[in-house]
Amino acid sequence: MPPHTINYLLPGARILTVFLYLNDVEAGGGTEFPYLHKLTVMPKKGKALIWPSVLNEDPNKKDGRTMHQALRVEAGIKYGANAWLHQGDFKDAFARGCH
């Protein structure tokens, strides 16, 4: 395959992230978005967060405002599940070695 055609195999940008809290946490364990007015979402069983990872005006550019971090669990344990939605077919691209 010519090198200039390889990009069509790539999964494209991650456009959305979904995070689901699977349990309550005794203390700490929030998800902080430091560039969104230091927004912190505390874990609560069944709560889901959904955020875009790209800019509306250019879905090929990452939106730095949605950078996030998990805060330390101070008491208890935190379980969560996440899903990433990509512009293209991530599974097939990964299987072909495009990662």
Image: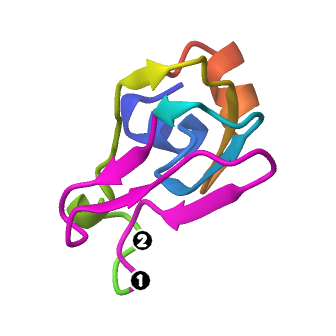
Residue, x 68% and y 48% (percent of image)? 44
Residue under pointer 2: 59
Q: Is residue 77 above or below residue 39?
A: above
In the image, farthest residue toward the bottom: 57
x and y, in percent, of residue 14 in the image:
51, 50
Residue, x 40% and y 22% (percent of image)? 74
Residue, x 59% and y 36% (percent of image)? 9
Q: Is residue 74 above or below residue 82?
A: above
Q: Are marks 1 and 2 in contact (CB under 8 Å)?
A: yes
- Magenta-drawn stretch contains 33: yes
Q: Is residue 93 above or below residue 41?
A: above
Magenta stretch: dominant SS? loop
x and y, in percent, of residue 65 in the image:
24, 65
The N terminus: image quadrant:
top right
- Give whichever of 77, 4 is nearer the camera: 77
x and y, in percent, of residue 51 in the image:
52, 64
Which segment did they paint magenta? 29-56
- Give whichever of 85, 41 is nearer the camera: 41
Residue under pointer 1: 56
Rounded to the nearest whole Å, what is the CA distance between mark 1 and mark 2?
6 Å
- Three-letter code for the amino acid on which mark 1 is drawn: Asn
- Number of the label disc, if any, that sits on residue 36: none
- Magenta-drawn stretch contains 88: no
Helix, strand or loop at label 2? It is loop
